[in-house]
């Protein structure tokens, strides 16, 4: 797959990224069916297959259960081949989420992610919004902390996984990358994508397959066509632990991008 610029960060990403919620967490998630976490062997094979298929982008978060610990252990020396996007703000413990967007917690979270992922830099760190985007950006310390971490060279880019149009527009003004939702049934955040395109910000799409509620191959193909018809999309992050789905997704997305949808 041909890499695309992540806005003006200088980072290049594959148009399909691998979401890693399902590598580490199977509680309090909204997928259509329950699932077992994959074994270490299955994760290693999935990561190898993703690289073989041209995927270079991993999306993870401390709130994704054991996702970061497993990636740190299983990526090994291949870390340099990947663009790693991580998050700050959400803490998932004992089956419950809570949030902390303070300066100190943000710095401590990034330092912990670096240790867990066994790396000395993160390519991009997103604020994991609880839904109150503007309050977080305007009244909490996370944004200043990420700016400071970028100055220190611990992260290459920053952004927010936002949930509102006002919040997303503020992210576009203040940060490098916005992660927004766009799919066949939800298009409320399209103004954010347009603004990000105009400002040359990186755009990551989450929940593009409606968290697995999309119907059949035709539904997946239509979802890709819809997302990539929007201006300025850098990458769509799709979470899968099924190698066949991963292969299908790359094949279908390539058809869409070549204009054969
Ligand atoms: N920051 C946030 O607030 C936030 C929220 C949600 C998600 N995310 C990120 O975005 C990623 C994607 O979001 P998401 O996981 O909610 O939604 P998604 O990518 O729209 O959907 C993932 C679901 O789709 C299924 N799937 C994948 N390919 C398929 C195919 N070809 N045919 C049928 N089903 C398929 C997967 O099941 P199989 O495993 O069976 O393939 C999985 O259950 C996450 O992994 C995470 O990294 C971030």
Image (cartoon, helix red, strand yellow):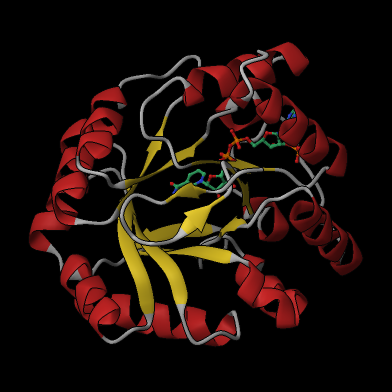
Q: Is residue 113 left or right of residue 162?
A: right
**Quadrant location of the N terminus?**
top right
Which quadrant of the view contains residue 152? bottom left
**Quadrant location of the C terminus?**
top right
User: Residue 60: percent from the left, percent from the top?
Assistant: 55, 61
Residue situated in front as seen by the camera: 218 or 96? 218
In this view, 128 is above or below 260: below
Q: Residue at x 54, y 88 (%)?
A: 115
Which quadrant of the view contains residue 131? top left
User: Residue 222: percent from the left, percent from the top?
Assistant: 61, 14
In this view, 5 is above or below 60: above
**Ligand 1 sits in which quadrant?**
top right
Q: Residue at x 61, y 17 (%)?
A: 259
Which quadrant of the view contains residue 108? bottom left
User: Residue 223: percent from the left, percent from the top?
Assistant: 58, 20
User: Residue 92: percent from the left, percent from the top?
Assistant: 50, 63
Mark yes or no: residue 93 visible.
no
Q: Is residue 6 left or right of residue 54?
A: left
């Amino acid at each position: 797959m041909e890499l695309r610029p992540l806005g003006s960060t200088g980072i290049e990403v594959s148009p399909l990224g691998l979401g890693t919620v399902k590598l580490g967490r199977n509680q309090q998630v909204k997928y259509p069916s329950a699932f077992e976490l994959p074994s270490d062997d299955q994760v290693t094979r999935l990561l190898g297959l993703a690289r073989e298929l041209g995927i270079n982008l991993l999306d993870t978060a401390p709130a994704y259960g054991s996702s970061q610990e497993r990636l740190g252990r299983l990526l090994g020396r291949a870390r340099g081949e990947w663009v790693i996007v991580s998050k700050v703000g959400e803490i998932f413990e004992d089956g419950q989420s809570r949030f902390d967007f303070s300066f100190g917690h943000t710095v401590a979270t990034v330092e912990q992610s670096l240790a867990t992922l066994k790396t000395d830099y993160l390519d991009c760190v997103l604020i994991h919004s609880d839904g109150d985007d503007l309050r977080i950006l305007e009244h909490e310390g996370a944004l200043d902390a990420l700016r400071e971490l970028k100055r220190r060279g611990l992260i290459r880019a920053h952004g927010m996984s936002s949930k509102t149009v006002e919040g997303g527009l503020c992210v576009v003004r203040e940060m490098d990358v916005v992660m927004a939702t766009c799919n066949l049934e939800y298009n409320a955040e399209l103004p954010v994508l347009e603004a990000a395109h105009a400002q040359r910000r990186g755009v990551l799409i989450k929940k593009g397959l409606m968290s697995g509620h999309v119907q059949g191959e035709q539904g997946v193909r239509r979802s890709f066509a819809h997302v990539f018809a929007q201006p300025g999309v850098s990458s769509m992050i799709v979470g899968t632990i099924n190698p066949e789905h991963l292969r299908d997704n790359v094949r279908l997305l390539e058809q869409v991008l070549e204009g054969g949808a």
